[in-house]
């Protein structure tokens, strides 16, 4: 479903991030990635989403080589990407509007979107938030709402960037229980080793521009 082959990437100023990085995510596989701050976890996900491009190497999404924006457009419809900061993802006035935004923009019927929004609110245990103003939510609540918005797009793969950062144990438990109950393919970057071990049979360390099994 996802493949990176020999990826080289550096920031302006010759700041090297990856030197020959390889990664493969198969259908149904769940991979966790750990690594120090600045090791390149978010950059890795940005490459997969076509938000930046490698200087060398190949990116494959759903068996198709992706080299330019048009290649990534279709793939993004099949990938649910949770940003590290929920404030980058939650922007509609109310919770239910935010969750419905993505599928409505994909052209889904309003009745279907309303039903799906209610299902996701219930499954994540945040139905009481549906009429809440998003700017008045706590960080943990925003994290759950941003995840709900991603799930509403019906993705095949979930890419989650630090999904448990700065949230309490109750929210972590909700996210863990929900993901355990699904069959999504997962690619998760987190400092929370226990969270990764609960969900991901395969865990890799990102260090010095490469991934190694842990």
Image (cartoon, rainbow, N blue to C red):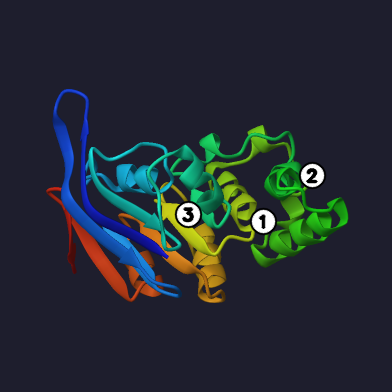
Instruction: Identify residue for label 3.
Output: 168
Q: Residues within 10 Å of mark 3 (few under 14, many from 20)?
A: few
Q: Judge left or right: residue 168 versus residue 110.
A: left
Residue that numbered label 1 is attached to: 152
Q: Are marks 2 and 3 in contact (CB under 8 Å)?
A: no
Depth check: give the residue in front, 38 or 10: 10
- Quadrant of the rendered structure where residue 181 is? bottom right
How far is disc 3 from disc 1 in space, using C-alphas? 24 Å
* Percent x, y of residue 175: 53, 63
Q: Residue at position x 58%, y 42% from top? A: 138
Between residue 79 and residue 140, name the one nearer to us.
79
Total numbered badges shown on the rendered structure: 3
Residue sitting at the far top: 13
Q: Kindly report the distance in space between the C-alpha atoms of the residues bearing marks 2 and 1.
A: 17 Å
Q: Nearer the viewer, mark 2 or mark 1?
A: 1
Q: Name the element at disc 2.
A: loop
Instruction: Residue under label 2, please give it.
Output: 131
Q: Quadrant of the N terminus?
A: bottom left
> Could you tell me if the residues under marks 3 and 1 are in contact, i.e. CB atoms within 8 Å?
no
Can residue 170 be seen by looking at this rendering?
A: yes
Nearer-N-terminus badge (3/1):
1
Query: How far from the left and from the top, in percent, is residue 59?
Result: 33, 52
Q: Please provide percent x and percent y for residue 74.
A: 55, 50
In-image side of 49 versus 9 (left or right) = right
Identify the residue at horizontal 14%, vertical 28% (top origin): 14
Mark 2 or 1 closer to N-term?
Answer: 2
Vertical arrangement, residue 176 with respect to residue 79, above or below: below
Q: Is residue 47 left or right of residue 163?
A: left
Q: Disc 2 vs disc 3: which is toward the camera?
A: 2
* Residue drawn at the location 15% of the way across and 36% of the way down: 16
Image quarter (top left, top right, bottom left or bottom right) of the C terminus: bottom left
């Amino acid at each position: 479903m996802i493949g990176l082959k020999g990826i080289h990437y550096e920031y302006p100023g010759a700041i090297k991030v990856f030197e020959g990085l390889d990664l493969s995510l198969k259908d149904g596989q769940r991979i966790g990635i750990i690594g120090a701050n600045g090791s390149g976890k978010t950059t890795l996900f940005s490459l997969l989403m076509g938000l930046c491009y490698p200087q060398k190497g190949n990116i494959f999404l759903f068996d198709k080589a992706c080299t330019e924006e048009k290649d990534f457009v279709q793939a993004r419809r099949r990938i649910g990407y949770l940003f590290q900061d929920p404030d980058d993802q939650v922007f509609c006035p109310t919770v239910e509007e935010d969750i419905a935004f993505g599928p409505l923009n994909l052209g889904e019927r309003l009745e279907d979107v309303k039903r799906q929004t209610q299902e996701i609110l219930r499954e994540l245990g945040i139905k009481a938030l549906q009429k809440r103003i998003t700017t008045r939510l706590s960080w943990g609540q925003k994290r759950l709402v941003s995840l709900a918005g991603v799930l509403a797009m019906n993705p095949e793969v979930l890419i989650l960037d630090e999904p448990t950062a700065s949230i309490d144990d109750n929210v972590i438990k909700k996210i863990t229980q929900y993901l355990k109950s699904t069959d999504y393919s997962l690619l998760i970057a987190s400092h929370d080793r226990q969270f990764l071990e609960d969900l991901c049979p395969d865990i890799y360390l990102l260090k010095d521009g490469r991934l190694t099994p842990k």
